[in-house]
Image (cartoon, rainbow, N blue to C red):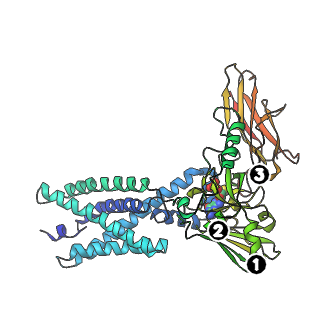
């Protein structure tokens, strides 16, 4: 047996790169198999690291111009970088192994590969456990990819042809990658909140059923229009992977300018007197007629019920901090009507929406509705939050908007248009539609107001289409009688503005 055959990745230079890359890809798949799409997945923190450290303009371009594609590209890039890092580890490992006198070469190569993978992973996670498990996974992937490659090629016949060995490495890494992906994708890492609570969870309540049924009943019967409680609630995060928090270990602390800091466990909050509230959210970074505005029924407690026992000083501001490293600061006054949600639409809060608990700050842009909330700090001075440090001004109240998402032909030849309108706590009083580019206006039909002080409404309007192309324009008037601003503004830095216009044929 040659020395090459004995070493794990001891291939001739011309093919070792390709085999190392295959091992790297298999290693990433293995990491996914172990961690699923959680922060312990190697590509997660790398994507997060890029999102945090890339210049603000790049991130803003990605959010405003690329939208969801931007974060998908970020994840894809992070997966690629992870594979290259692991491949580098395998190459280094094999180089070291090849310098070692046999028969220890293979062992040394594998150990060095695992050690470097461990180092890379631990550096990104600051976690020894994640590093160790990833190191082992990469070692296994590396071993199987190269060793099976060698073994298969050897069975085919000595001397082992490079190409055959490479093909065999491909053949062994494909099932590794497929299996790793399938394993990772099948994992659900959310701890069912029922298991950490004694008795009935607060979101299991006949009142929830009644409220949800009412919202369904009051939703306008317009095909293609999202109902009053969103079927698919948008998600915006600074990280590509959601934190996986054990409700058992989670706590929320009230700190800063208070008489004495107070801490709450998950059970503490679930045992309090809960409320169910409809609250809509909208992201400051979305397009004027975008899809990052939604509504849900949330179960939780008024935030001041948690803050008051700490004896807060009468200070100007507050900072909310979260388990994913996110933080936002805003005026204390906005906190007064704040809500801490643990349930959503009759279920525990989904991981993507902040499990185990999130803040809801009525009428304000989504960004201060901090998910995975861990700390409420009372501040004597206003400071910049995560997005404000990157140039955004998204801590204030939402702009008024009427969106146009549905245009359809009715059986009788008329046209039907529809969408949602939202103005935060100001409420929506009226939506008007123009079918002639803004010359004349007619009032749209609105859905019944949902109970709640921070909810959207649906609108619809049907008309006889003029022959050919025409311009449909929509505008809302908020509950204070103020017409939606016609001045056009891009989402950056303080939210989109203008009237939604669409050419209809
Ligand atoms: N911890 C944490 N909270 C967060 C964010 C985040 O990245 N991390 N994103 C914010 C932004 S920008 C918005 S628009 C809303 C979106 O909430 P959703 O994902 O539940 O729709 O959450 C906010 N809260
Ligand atoms: Mo947002």
Q: Position of residue 348 (x, y in %)?
A: 59, 56
Left or right: residue 331 compared with residue 59: right
Residue in the image at 74% along x and 28% along y: 470
Residue in the image at 64% along x and 68% along y: 268
Give the class, few, some or many, for how many residues have Cα within 10 Å of label 3's Cα (few <14, many ≥20): many
Q: Is residue 246 above or below residue 260?
A: above
Left or right: residue 113 compared with residue 462: left
> Which residue was labeled with disc 3?
454
Please name whichever residue, 244 or 163, is drawn nearer the observer in this view of the structure: 244
Ranked by sequence position, the earlier of labels 3 and 1 is 1
Quadrant position of ligand 1: bottom right
Give the class, few, some or many, for how many residues have Cα within 10 Å of label 2's Cα (few <14, many ≥20): few
Q: Is residue 144 above or below residue 314?
A: above
> Which residue was labeled with disc 1?
258
SS label for mark 2: helix
**Disc on res. 268:** 2
Residue in the image at 18% along x and 68% along y: 4
How far apart are labels 1 and 2 at the CA level? 20 Å
Q: Mark 2 vs mark 3: give the one in front.
A: 2
| Residue 476 figure quarter | top right
How far apart are labels 3 and 1 at the CA level? 29 Å
Left or right: residue 142 compared with residue 200: left
Ranked by sequence position, the earlier of labels 2 and 3 is 2
SS label for mark 1: loop
Residue in the image at 26% along x and 76% along y: 108
Q: Residue furthest front?
A: 199
């Amino acid at each position: 047996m040659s020395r090459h055959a004995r070493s794990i990745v001891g291939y001739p230079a011309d093919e070792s790169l390709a085999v190392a890359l295959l091992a790297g890809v298999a290693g990433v798949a293995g990491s996914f198999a172990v961690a699923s799409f959680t922060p312990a997945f190697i590509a997660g923190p790398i994507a997060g690291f890029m999102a945090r450290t890339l210049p603000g303009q790049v991130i803003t371009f990605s959010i405003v111009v690329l939208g969801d594609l931007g974060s998908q590209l970020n994840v894809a890039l992070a997966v690629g970088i992870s594979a290259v890092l692991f491949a580098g580890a395998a190459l280094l490992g094999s180089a070291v192994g090849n310098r070692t006198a046999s028969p220890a070469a293979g062992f040394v190569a594998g150990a060095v590969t695992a050690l470097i993978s461990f180092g890379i992973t631990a550096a990104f996670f600051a976690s020894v456990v994640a590093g160790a498990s990833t190191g082992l996974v990469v070692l296994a992937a590396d071993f199987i990819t190269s060793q099976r490659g060698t073994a298969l090629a050897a069975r085919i016949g000595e001397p082992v042809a490079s190409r055959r060995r490479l093909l065999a490495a491909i053949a062994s890494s494909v099932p590794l990658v497929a299996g790793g992906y399938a394993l990772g994708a099948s994992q659900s890492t959310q701890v069912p909140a029922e298991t950490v609570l004694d008795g009935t969870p607060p979101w299991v309540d006949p009142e929830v059923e009644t409220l949800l049924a009412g919202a369904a009943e009051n939703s306008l019967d317009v095909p293609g229009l999202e109902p009053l409680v969103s079927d698919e609630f948008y998600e915006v995060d600074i990280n590509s992977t959601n934190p996986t928090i054990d409700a058992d270990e989670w706590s929320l602390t009230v700190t800063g300018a208070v008489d004495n800091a107070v801490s709450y466990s998950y059970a503490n909050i679930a045992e309090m007197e809960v409320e169910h509230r409809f609250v809509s959210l909208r992201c400051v970074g979305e397009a004027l007629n975008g899809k990052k505005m939604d509504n849900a029924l949330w179960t939780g407690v008024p935030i001041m019920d948690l803050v008051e026992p700490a004896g807060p000083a009468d200070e100007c501001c507050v900072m909310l901090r979260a388990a994913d490293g996110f933080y936002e600061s805003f005026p204390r006054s906005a906190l007064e009507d704040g809500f801490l949600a643990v349930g959503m639409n009759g279920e525990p809060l989904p991981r993507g929406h902040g499990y185990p608990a999130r803040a809801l700050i009525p009428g304000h842009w989504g960004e201060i509705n901090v998910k995975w909330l861990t700390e409420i700090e009372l501040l004597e001075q206003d400071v910049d939050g995560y997005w404000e440090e990157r140039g955004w001004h998204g801590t204030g109240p939402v702009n008024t908007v009427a969106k146009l998402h549905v245009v359809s032909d009715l059986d009788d030849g008329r046209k039907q248009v529809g969408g949602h309108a939202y103005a935060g706590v100001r409420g929506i009083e009226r939506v008007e539609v123009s079918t002639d580019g803004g010359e004349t206006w007619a009032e749209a039909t609105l859905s019944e107001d949902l109970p709640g002080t921070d909810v959207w409404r649906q609108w619809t309007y049907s008309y006889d289409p003029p022959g050919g192309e025409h311009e449909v324009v929509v505008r809302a008037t908020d509950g204070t009688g103020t017409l939606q601003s016609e001045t056009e503004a891009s989402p950056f830095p303080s939210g989109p503005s203008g009237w939604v216009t669409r050419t209809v044929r």
